[in-house]
Amino acid sequence: LTLSANSWPSRVVANQKSQTFEYNSPENIQQSFDLQYVTPTNHRLLLECIVEAHRSEVFDKLLNARALSLRIDGSVDRTQSDKIYVLGEVVTASGDAEQVFLRVAEPQTRGAVGVLGEVKQALEASFGENATVLLERASSVVTDGASVNVGEKTGLWSLLQSERSEVVNRVTERRFCRY
């Protein structure tokens, strides 16, 4: 409970430990851990360190998957704020299905345009300029049947298809222009 618990070195140590920690390994199952009280702010920082340590592994998993499906769902939290959850479902090279949490965000714009903006922002925040590669590689989108998702012209599905077509066209133009 000292000020040093919030300092920069603790973030570095947490990052280093998270790179080598495997919760389900036989060595860790046998050990007993002392529970520590962590403030919500410190917990968020700890999770950010773990995520940063494994970001490239997650991107490689999504990029090298046999199939990538984006899963998008909206919900209202206990403070009555709209939240958009973005996940990736992949089929790995070995044929296993895995789900990867990408981001939760609050749409700044209402309707399908706001949801699409958050999906793009989720991919960009997680993977930077590589986000467009994932959008290009996505083979499906999974949502519920809410009206914001299924509108024929202005629903999330149609907006996402248009966005994906633009990405594919830009990539094709860049590849074509090289030759």
Image: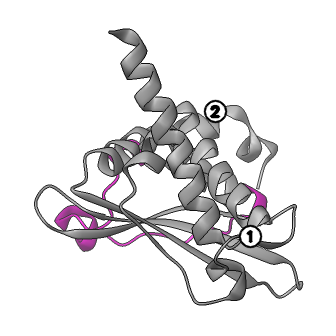
- The residue lying at 14 percent from left, 55 percent from top is 93
In whole angstroms, how far apart are the C-alphas of marks 2 and 1? 42 Å
Image quadrant holding the N terminus, namely bottom right
Q: Position of residue 6 (x, y in %)?
A: 75, 45
Compare residues 83 and 179 and report the one nearer the observer: 179
Which numbered circle lies on residue 112? Answer: 1
Residue 103 seen in render = no
Q: Secondary structure at mark 1?
A: helix
Compare residues 134 and 31 and report the one nearer the observer: 134
Compare residues 82 and 31 and report the one nearer the observer: 82
Magenta range: 18-42
Compare residues 68 and 99 and report the one nearer the observer: 68
- The residue lying at 78 percent from left, 49 percent from top is 2
Amino acid type at circle 2 is Pro
Q: Position of residue 98 (x, y in %)?
A: 30, 68
Question: Does residue 94 appear to the left or right of 130 in the view shown?
Answer: left
With respect to residue 92, does 145 lie above or below?
A: below
Q: Position of residue 137 (x, y in %)?
A: 37, 49
Colour scheme of the rendered structure:
one colour
- The residue lying at 63 percent from left, 32 percent from top is 9
Which residue is the extreme one toward the top?
A: 179
Q: Mark 2 — residue?
A: 9
